[in-house]
Image (spheres, helix red, strand yellow):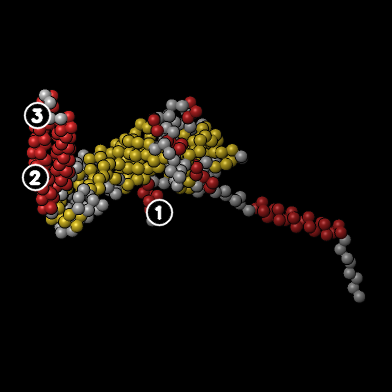
Amino acid sequence: MPNHTTPTRDAIGLLLLVLAATMLLGACDQPPEMREDPPERPVLALTLEPPEDMTSRTFSARAEAAERTALAFRVSGQVVLVHADLGDRVMEGDVLARLDDRDYRLKVRELEGQLEAAEGQLEEAEVNYRRGQDLVRDGTISRADYDGLRSAFRQAQGQRDAAREGLATARAALEDTVLRAPFDAHVARRNIEPHEQASPERVVFVLDDLEEIELRVGMPETLVVHRDRLTAVDVHFAALGRRYAGRVRAVGVDVDEDTQTYPVRIVVDNPDQRILPGMTARLDFRAGLPEADEQGYFHVPMTAVFDHEGQPHVWVLDEAGGTVTRRPVSLGPLERDGVRVLGDLHAGQQVVTAGVQHLSEGQTVRVLTEDEMRGARR
């Protein structure tokens, strides 16, 4: 039988050492792996505005006529004529519609006759009363007879006054059979046709005064506290492709329980009357903030802030090279549409507002244009 020798521990160790050296030498012969730079990443960015001005706060609203009036006849009757139609421009005093006034005219004539009779009775009673004053003094008539003449005179006065009031009411009712425009306006609604029955409870016309347009928004408490310092309200109507200067007409002092905002009414002059009720608008508010605790703070969206090593940071774009730099910030007041930050920042810098978690120090980025953003949403 052949003689087989079992390998020793020293031989096995030597073999492993040779294999390791061979693999190491082979690795040294391989070319070094090239490390690729991070690819250019598209981002959204915001340009920081001066901290002495409050950044523009944007709201959406629908246009309403600053003055809208619902009209109804004050008396009942059958409609005989309608002079105004939907969309018509009417002037103050223009006739909008008429009721059949025959019964009202008869009532006026009846009360005119009653008033004439009451005035005749009063005239007679007054003559008797004046004569009685002389007769009671010389004893021709008794005191009781004189008191009767005086009572008859006063009763005649009351009947005359009642007849006057009744006639005035009847004449007003006759006048109310004609519905007139209370101011210059446009007909927003027409709810009546000839031969229909009208009543004081039924609205027959709605008029809009379009000289001024009103917009209503709900403002958060962080903005409403600066209502006295609002310096501008820009109102943009996309359908018209035009901006208008707005002004604050009223600010509510009681919060809306549903939205937790304060109602604010904005008015826009509409001399050419191109703005129509129902049009959508974007409102940009701006106000000065001179308080010391607001100085140096910039308003940014919450998406611009990220945590790095336990401290909030933002990415700032390098204007020259298109790269980003991490900047630590301190957080200020939290607001509905963002937060105020304080740090090594200045107005005009661009801060990344989306995709902050996917960036690295010095990475090259490209800011998306508005056209690219609109295309991405489609």
Residue at label 1?
377
Q: Return the x and y of residue 9 as percentages of the image width and height.
A: 86, 59
Could you tell me which secondary element the residue under label 2 belongs to?
helix
Residue at label 2?
113
- The answer to whether residue 324 of the structure is visible from this angle is no
Residue appearing at x 34%, y 39% in the figure = 265
Vertical order, 317 against 29 (above or below): above
Amino acid type of disc 3? Arg
Q: Return the x and y of residue 219 as percentages of the image width and height.
A: 41, 40
- Asked if labels 1 and 3 touch by Cβ distance under 8 angstroms, the answer is no
Q: Tell me which numbered mark, 2 or 3, is placed earlier along the sequence.
A: 2
Q: Return the x and y of residue 261 as percentages of the image width and height.
A: 43, 42
Instruction: Determine the CA span between mark 1 and mark 2.
Output: 79 Å
- Mark 1, other Cα within 10 Å: few <14 / some 14–19 / many ≥20: few
Q: Which one is in front, 378 or 53?
A: 53
Amino acid type of disc 1? Arg
Question: For residue 147, what is the image quadrant?
Answer: top left
Residue appearing at x 42%, y 32% in the figure = 226
Q: Which mark is residue 300?
A: none
- The answer to whether residue 72 of the structure is visible from this angle is yes
Residue at label 3?
131
Q: Is residue 204 left or right of residue 103?
A: right
Q: Quadrant of the N terminus?
A: bottom right
Q: Tell me which numbered mark, 1 or 2, is placed earlier along the sequence.
A: 2
Which label sits in the foreground, 1 or 2?
Answer: 2
Could you tell me which secondary element the residue under label 3 belongs to?
helix
